[in-house]
Image: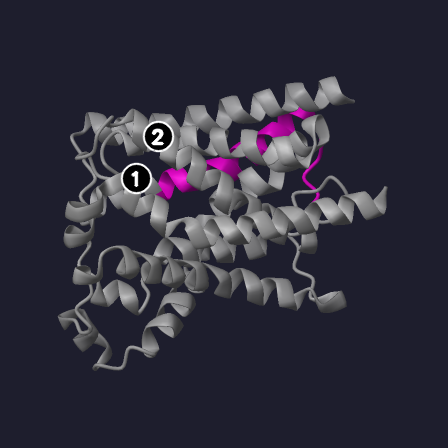
């Protein structure tokens, strides 16, 4: 059974990387670069995000594992609120805002001069910053279908296979590295970290792998607790929306000039790290109790 899982996982990764990188490299070959405003590049990225789920479907067809949406060894596409599972959905939707905002607090502590206390960006919200979290979360939940494209593959197929093959803790590390490397073409054109940092792009790829380990552990947690990839899709979408109250009041150029790009990201990831460690402890305790 383990050899079968390994072979199936190899098929899945080959399809997922192959189809996604084909799209990413096509975008790069056409001259598109990431600057945060290029709508064409964002369209290619959104299309690439659908490939992990597409690879999941193709893999199940090739390996004859079936396309069951719910149940054991399924695609985990059902939604179930029984046994207070709705709490996990709520956690998944809210926790990205919490750890991102706490990360901003740490950045203010590290670089107080970056905080203005006000921002022209708040004018969009009629100077009512308390609206920002609601807009961030509601918009992300509505557009979470693109995130489902990733989570339907990574959490819906890759992680269950890795956990069967090597256990939870190793799976989280290996899964994070795989997911981080999947982003490598984008990292090489400046997505997430830009291009102006020591060791570009290799340090950025390593940082992406580390980030994927952290958030991947939380996404795996909400998936296991609900036996569904939907809370992971919601969480992924909220995380990617990246708009909090303090985001509108911070000058990131001041922060990166003082701390550097890598230190800026590492500091902002500390709250996520704490949450990741907590959920890993919970999952390990549950596994120990089950045994």
Which span is picked out in magenta? 46-68
Q: Position of residue 206 (x, y in %)?
A: 38, 30
Q: Position of residue 51 (x, y in %)?
A: 45, 36
Which mark is first along the chain, 1 or 2? 1
Q: Is residue 222 left or right of residue 249?
A: right
Work out whether 125 lies above or below 151. Answer: below
The reply to whether the magenta stretch includes residue 235 is no
Q: Is residue 163 left or right of residue 22?
A: right
Task: Give the main secondary structure of the magenta stretch.
Answer: helix
Say which residue label 2 marks.
Answer: 205
Q: Position of residue 276 (x, y in %)?
A: 54, 49
- Along the line of sight, the residue nearer the viewer: 226 or 65: 226
Can residue 224 be spotted in the picture?
A: no
The label number, if any, that marks residue 243 in the structure image: none
Residue at position x 56%, y 26% from top? Answer: 12
Alpha-carbon span between mark 2 and mark 1 = 20 Å
Work out whether 267 lies above or below 57. Answer: below
The label number, if any, that marks residue 44 in the structure image: 1
The reply to whether the magenta stretch includes residue 55 is yes
Residue at position x 26%, y 27% from top? Answer: 201
Q: Is residue 239 left or right of residue 85?
A: left
Foreground: disc 2 or disc 1:
2
Q: Quadrant of residue 137?
A: bottom left
Residue at position x 71%, y 68% from top? Answer: 84
Locate the N terminus by quadrant.
top right
Q: Residue furthest right?
A: 291
């Amino acid at each position: 059974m383990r050899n079968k899982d390994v072979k199936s996982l190899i098929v899945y990764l080959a399809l997922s990387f192959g189809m996604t990188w084909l799209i990413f490299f096509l975008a790069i070959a056409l001259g598109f670069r990431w600057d945060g405003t290029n709508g064409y590049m964002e369209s290619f990225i959104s299309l690439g995000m659908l490939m992990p789920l597409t690879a999941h479907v193709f893999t199940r067809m090739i390996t004859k594992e079936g396309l069951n949406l719910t149940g054991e060894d399924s695609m985990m596409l059902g939604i179930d609120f029984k046994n207070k599972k709705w709490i996990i959905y709520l956690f998944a939707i809210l926790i990205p805002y919490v750890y991102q905002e706490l990360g901003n607090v740490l950045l203010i502590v590290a670089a107080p001069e970056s905080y203005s206390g006000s921002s022209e960006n708040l004018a969009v919200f009629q100077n009512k910053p308390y609206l920002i979290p609601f807009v961030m979360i509601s918009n992300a939940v509505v557009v979470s279908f693109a995130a489902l494209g990733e989570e339907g593959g990574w959490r819906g197929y890759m992680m269950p296979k890795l956990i069967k093959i090597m256990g939870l803790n190793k799976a989280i590390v290996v899964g994070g590295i795989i997911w981080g490397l999947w982003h490598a073409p984008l990292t090489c054109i400046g997505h997430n970290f830009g291009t102006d940092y020591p060791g570009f792009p290799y340090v950025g790829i390593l940082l992406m792998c580390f980030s994927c380990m952290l958030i991947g552990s939380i996404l795996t947690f909400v998936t296991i607790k609900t036996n569904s990839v939907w809370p992971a899709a919601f969480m992924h979408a909220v995380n990617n929306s990246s708009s909090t109250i303090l985001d509108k009041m911070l000058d990131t150029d001041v922060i990166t000039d003082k701390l550097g790009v890598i230190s800026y990201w590492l500091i902002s990831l500390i709250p996520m790290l704490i949450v990741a460690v907590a959920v890993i402890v919970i999952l390990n305790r549950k596994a120990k109790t089950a045994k």
